[in-house]
Image (cartoon, helix red, strand yellow):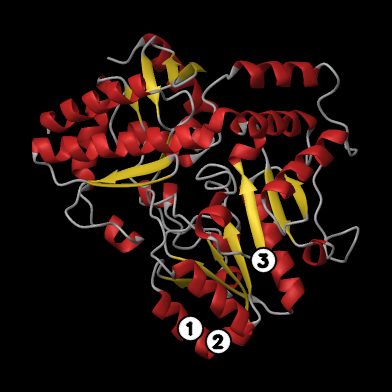
Amino acid sequence: MRPQASQHLYIRAQQVLPGGVNSPVRSAYQRVFELDPIYVASGYGAYIQLTDGRMLIDYCLGYGPLILGHAHPEIVQTIADTAETGTCFGMTCEKEVQLAEVISSRLPGFQKMRFLNSGTEAAMLAIRLARAATGRQKIVKFDGCYHGHADPLLVQAGSGVATLGLPNSPGVPPATVADTLVMPYNDLTAVQNLMQTRGTEIAAILVEPVLGNVGCIPPRDGFLAGLRHLCDQSGSLLVFDEVMTGFRIGPSGALGRFHVRPDLIILGKVIGGGLPIGACCGSASLMDLIAPAGPVYQAGTFSGNPLAMAAGLKTLEILQRDDAFTQLNENSERLAAGLRRAGEKVGVPLQVNQIGAMLSLYFCDRPVTDYTIAKTANQELFKRYYRKLIDLGVHLAPSAFESSFLSIAHTQEVIEETVAAHEEALRAL
C-alpha cells in the first residue's frame, strides 16, 4: 500500500504529465526499481525529506548542480534578495557581466561566453558555432556521452535512454543524425582511424571529459590530449561538455585537472547555483562569431536571468572559501574507499569509480572504462541494492547509469552513515 500522500500525488501526476514526470529518469523509481512513488517535499544540506516524511541522505543533488547542498542559507538569501529587485528583464544586467568575469578568470584563455538556460541549449550552440567556424558539417560524439536532448546528439546517449531501455528516440529523422559520428569513449585508436579518413569533414569532436551519464568514467591517460592533437591536425574544434564536471571536479573543472585545452567549453549545473543555466565559453575570436557580434544566431528570453546569475556568483564565491575543493575531494575519496572496503568485506564484486565530487558503483569484477563495460554490470543486483539502500535512508539517482554527487554538506559523519548503510545493503544481497 502506497503512503497516502505519495499515492495521491502519483494519481494526479499521471493525469496531467506524460508518464507522471517532466524528465524520463524520474519515473524509474516505479518503472525500473518497482518502488512506491517517491516525491520530495524539501531538502536541506545533505538530506531530502519525502512527502511521506522519510529523510534520506541525498547523492543525486539535482543531478549535480547542488555542490553546496540543498537550500544553502547564503544561496537562499541571495535568491530572495535578488527577486526583490526583479526576476526577468529581457535586458542585460550587471550580474551577467560579473558572473562571466568570474568564470573567465577561472578558465584562462576563455575570454567570452554566452549564457543560456540549459546544458542542452549550450551544446546546440557549440555545434552551430563549430560548424560556422570550420565550414564543415559532421561532428564526432562518444558512446554513452549525453549532451542533452537535441536531435543530432540523441544517439548512443546513455543516461535515461539507457535506464529505461528506450531507443535513441522516435521523432528524430535519420537525416538529422546523419552527420553525427559515434566513437567508443577512451578508444583513441578508433578516433585516430576515423580522423585519418574523414578528418577534413569534421567540424568538432564533442566529449564529456569525464563520462557522467553511464556512471562516472574518467578518461584514460592520454585520451583527451590525443583528441586535442587530432583536432589540431585536422582543423576541427575540440569541445568539452563540462555541464557536470565544470567547477565540480576542481576549481577549473577538467581544464585544470587534465591540463588539456579545448576550443569550447559547455557549462551548466554548478554555475547556476541550483537554478536553470547553461553557458558556451571560448576565445574572443570564436565567440565573436555569435550574433550580434557575428552571423551565428542564438537568442533566449530567460538567458542571463538575474536569479540564476546571482545564485551562480554566490556559489562560486563560497567554493573559493576555506579550501572547499580539498574538502570535497577528501570526502569523496573517503566515501569511495569505504564503498570498496565494504564490497571486499562482504565478498560482492564491486567497482567504484571516483573523480572529484563525482562517483559511481558497478556490480562487476573488472574496471569500468567505457559504456560497453558499464552495460555488462549486473543490473538486477543494482536494482535490489538500490531498493535496500532507500529503505536504509540513502538516495542515489534512480539509475545504474547516473553519477552520484557530493556537496560540502556531506560531512565525514554523513559519509560514515552512508558506508554503514551501503554495507548493510550489500549483506542483504
Label 2 element class: helix
Q: Quadrant of residue 247?
A: top right
For the residues bearing labels 1 and 2, Cβ distance under 8 angstroms: yes
In the rendered structure, which disc, 2 or 3, sits on the residue that comes first in sequence?
2
- The percent position of residue 136, horizontal first and vertical second, equals 69, 79
Q: Amino acid at mark 1?
A: Leu
Query: Alpha carbon of mark 1 to alpha carbon of mark 3: how far?
Result: 20 Å
Which residue bears the numbered disc 2? 198
Residue at 53% of width from left, 46% of height from top?
244
Q: Is residue 411 above or below residue 398?
A: above
Label 3 element class: loop
| Residue count near mark 2 (Cα–Cα under 10 Å), binned few <14, some 14–19, many ≥20 | few
Residue at 60% of width from left, 84% of height from top?
233
Residue 67 visible from this viewpoint: no
**Closer to us: mark 2 or mark 3?**
3
Residue 293 is left or right of residue 14, and the answer is right
Which residue bears the numbered disc 1? 194
- The percent position of residue 151, horizontal first and vertical second, equals 59, 60
Residue 91 is left or right of residue 276, and the answer is right
Residue 423 is left or right of residue 102, and the answer is left
Which residue bears the numbered disc 3? 263
Q: Is residue 243 above or below residue 59?
A: below
Q: Quadrant of residue 341?
A: top left
Q: Is residue 142 above or below residue 327?
A: below
Query: Alpha carbon of mark 2 to alpha carbon of mark 3: how far?
Result: 20 Å
Residue at 53% of width from left, 48% of height from top?
245
Query: Alpha carbon of mark 1 to alpha carbon of mark 2: how far?
Result: 6 Å
Q: Amino acid at mark 3?
A: Asp
- The percent position of residue 84, horizontal first and vertical second, equals 82, 16
Residue at 40% of width from left, 56% of height from top?
218
- Residue most extreme to the bottom: 197
